[in-house]
Structures are given as structure tokens and as C-alpha cells.
Image (tube, rainbow, N blue to C red):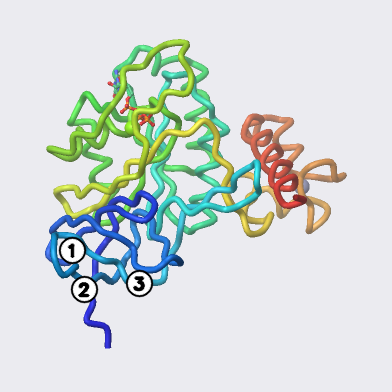
Amino acid sequence: MSSGNSGLVIAAYGRRGRLETAAGKALPFLLRGRRLRVVCGDRVQWEAQSHGHTAIVTAVEPRRNSLARTDPASGRQEILAANVDCICVVVAAEPAPDWFVADRFLVAAAAMAARPLLISNKQDLPSADDPAYAAELAAYMRAGYDLLRVSAHDVASLQPLLSALDARQAMLVGQSGVGKSSLINALVPGADQATRALSRGREGRHATTASIMHRLAGGARLIDSPGVRDFLPAIGHEVEIQSGFPEIAAHAGQCRFRDCRHLHEPGCAVREAAATGEIWPRRYESYRRLLRQQQAAGAR
Ligand SMILES: Nc1nc2c(ncn2[C@@H]2O[C@H](COP(=O)(O)OP(=O)(O)OP(=O)(O)O)[C@@H](O)[C@H]2O)c(=O)[nH]1
Ligand SMILES: [Mg+2]
Ligand SMILES: [Zn+2]
């Protein structure tokens, strides 16, 4: 019945954006109808406009998964991208890392059943050897996360990342200034994503303002996303938070109470493991903060 063509949304700005046709051509699009919403990564149906080189998007295919955030002020959920196989959480020793942000993206990855991948960029900087930075990375590895150490300024260091991305749809997320767009530029010839020199002491500067999907030579797709100050994942149920902390989930079976939330319950194996350092205490604190904030958002 539908004579539509299929396409892939590679950028979305409100009611318009760009899609890639099945033939691999990029086209600007408009959405038909008020109720249609699309995000980067969506598979859509479209029709050619009678004149001009614009596609009219008529329908969105069901999403395999989606990365969603909760607006802490309104409690509303917002979908940022769809059909993402791998969430690449990019961190760097500079600007000063906020590990809680990294943790929250890792929780989101677990909740959407995407592969979490931690990427330590700017390994060329001396600050990458900072003991506090190294200790955090080590904690993620102990928890079971895959970690890649790369530098956007050293193309050879990106080879393992290319292999890890395979032919899948992946997304770079993280704080502003960690080098997400620089990585895209190094991986995608001609991508020409704007990057911004780090201006010390000046807050709230983001080089990238919208998510854009790029195509890598091997066939993988990689979404560059705007850096964030904070990120509150959209969580359907509290257990999803625990699943986002594999080292906590691994200890939960030894808690006295089966429904232990690992806060103040007696006989909590998680709290004990955090006290001995077996669980990295900062990660445990991250879990508690997220649980608290999630409760506050849900109580609205
Ligand atoms: N030394 C070094 N500098 C890097 C590296 N990657 C990025 N940078 C620098 O870090 C700064 C920020 O890089 P961007 O690529 O704009 O960072 P971003 O994560 O895209 O930032 P937003 O778009 O604001 O989220 C730029 O000055 C880059 O040149 C790296 O591997 N090594
Ligand atoms: Mg950027
Ligand atoms: Zn417990």
C-alpha cells in the first residue's frame, strides 16, 4: 500500500533534518503531520516532494531501542537517539572528568541493552598518567567494562576502536570537550565536525549542538552528540540502575534481604564490599546518588 522509500535519519532538528536514502544519498527532510517525531538513528518511510530535493517523512519504523534522558526539572523523558548497538562513553583526563556522568551513560546503555564501551581519549597528554585518573579507569575494568585508550591525534590508536565498532550503529557520548567530534574527524575523512579549543575557566561552551550520524569506511555508523554537563537516564524501574553497575549486581545475591536496595539495610553485601574497597567506593556513591535522584524524579 505505501509507495514509500526507506531511509535512515542522520540528523534531526525539530520538524526537519537529513536522512540517508537506501541508495546512500543524503537528503533534507520535513516531517508530515504534527504527531510524527524522529531522532538520529530512526528508520523511516519517505516520499519525494513534487518539486525540490526534499523528502517528506511519512512514518517511523518501530525502534529497536532508544537512548532517553529525564529532564530533572520537569520529570519528562526525551529520546536522544534510536537503534544504537553500542554506547561509547568518551572520557579524558582534561577537562576535569565528572565520573558520575560517565556512570549514568553506562546505566543508560544497560537499560537500552546496548553494548557499553569506555573510551579514554587524549592518551597523548601527560595528564592521562595522572594516578587518580588511572585509578578510576582501573575500577571500570575491574567492574568488567571494556576500555579503549585512544588519541584523536594518533590515527593508529583508533584501530581497536574501529574493530570494536564493527558494522554497527554506535554513539559517542560524554562531557563537553572530551574529544567526541575530534574522534569523528579522525575516523571519518571529510566529516569536518566543528571542534572547539578548550577555554579554561569558561563554563557552558559546547562545540557540538546536535547529534549527527556519520558513516565509517567499514560500514559502521557513528553518532556524534553534544557534550553534557549532567545526564539523568530515563529509567523504567529501579532494578535497571543496579543492572547498570555490574559490580554491585554481582554482590547483590549475598545481601541478607532479596529486595535489598543497598542503602541502609542490615547485612548488605554491597555496602560491605564498598567499605573494604572491593567495590570502588565512588561507584557505590554514584549508584546511591542515581537512586536518590531517580526517586525524586519519580515522586514528582
Ligand atoms: N591532546 C589531545 N587533544 C584532543 C584530543 N581529542 C580532542 N582534543 C582537543 O580537545 C578539544 C575539544 O575537542 P572536541 O572534539 O571539540 O570535544 P567534544 O567532546 O566534541 O566537545 P562538545 O562538542 O562540546 O561535546 C579540542 O581542542 C581538541 O583539539 C586528543 O586525543 N588529544
Ligand atoms: Mg563535539
Ligand atoms: Zn544490599
Residue found 44% across the figure and 55% down from its top: 114
Residue 58 appears left or right of 185: right
Please state which of the two labelled residues, at mark 1 or mark 3, is closer to the viewer: 3
Q: Could you tell me how far apart the alpha carbons at marks 2 and 3 are, in whole angstroms?
A: 10 Å
Quadrant of the rendered structure where residue 146 is?
top left
Considering every residue shown, the one lying at the far bottom of the view is 1
Mark 1 element type: strand
- The residue that mark 1 highlights is 21
Residue 145 appears left or right of 198: right
150 over 72 or under it: above or below? above
Foreground pick, 254 / 103: 103
Callout 2: few (<14), some (14-19), or many (20+) C-alpha neighbours within 10 Å?
some
The percent coordinates of residue 148 (x first, y second) are: 35, 36
Could you tell me if the residues under marks 1 and 3 are in contact, i.e. CB atoms within 8 Å?
A: no
Foreground pick, 22 / 174: 22
Q: Which mark is residue 5?
A: 2
Mark 3 element type: strand
- The residue that mark 3 highlights is 59
Could you tell me if the residues under marks 2 and 3 are in contact, i.e. CB atoms within 8 Å?
A: no
Q: Which of pointers 2 and 3 lies earlier in the amino acid sequence?
A: 2
Residue found 21% across the figure and 38% down from its top: 159
Q: Is mark 3 within 8 Å of ligand 2?
A: no
